[in-house]
Image (cartoon, helix red, strand yellow):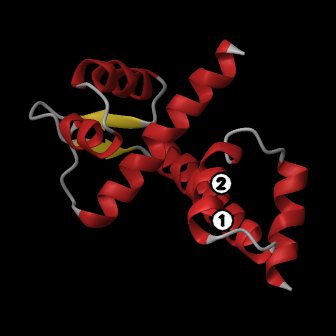
Amino acid sequence: MRMNRIRESEEMYLETILLLRKRSANVHSIDIAEELGYVKSSVSRGVNLLKDKGYITIDPSGLIEFTAEGKKKAEGIYERHTVLTKALTKLGADPETAENDACRIEHVISDTLFELLKKFIAR
């Protein structure tokens, strides 16, 4: 169970960095903390774990950049989120519920089910 929480946290940070980068070229830990409503010390730990795994780099000023692997992983997470939101909406969920539930499901859905949902929303 703890491993799932670690993966979910890691994925949440990657997705948040991706979305922040769409709004601004300059992303720092404080931006992530503000976006997620987390304390800066928690975000610093999480960001350093992403750096240690090779998903991001952090320059001396604190600017966060994706590595190629990190960007690919973040884009995959975001794709799961958007596909799930569309599928849940297509099933009849209101947009807010679809968005909130997609945010939780995206971290645990199997690749097989995800591919089925992609086909479902393409119809």
Q: Nearer the viewer, residue 75 or 117?
A: 117
| Residue at image coords 31%, 30% | 38
Quadrant of image for the C terminus: bottom right
In this rendering, is residue 25 above or below 119?
above
- Type of amino acid at the residue the image marks with label 1: Thr
Image position, residue 108 (x, y; %): 75, 38
Quadrant of image for the N terminus: top right
Q: Nearer the viewer, residue 64 or 103?
A: 103
The residue tagged 1 is 85
- Type of amino acid at the residue the image marks with label 2: Ala
Check whether the beta carbons of the residues at disc 1 and disc 2 lie within 8 A of each other: yes
90 left or right of 31? right
Image position, residue 16 (x, y; %): 40, 48
Give the quarter of the image for residue 44: top left
The residue tagged 2 is 102
Q: Spatial distance from mark 1 to mark 2, Cα to Cα?
A: 5 Å
| Residue at image coords 21%, 59% | 25
Q: Earlier in the sequence, mark 1 or mark 2?
A: 1
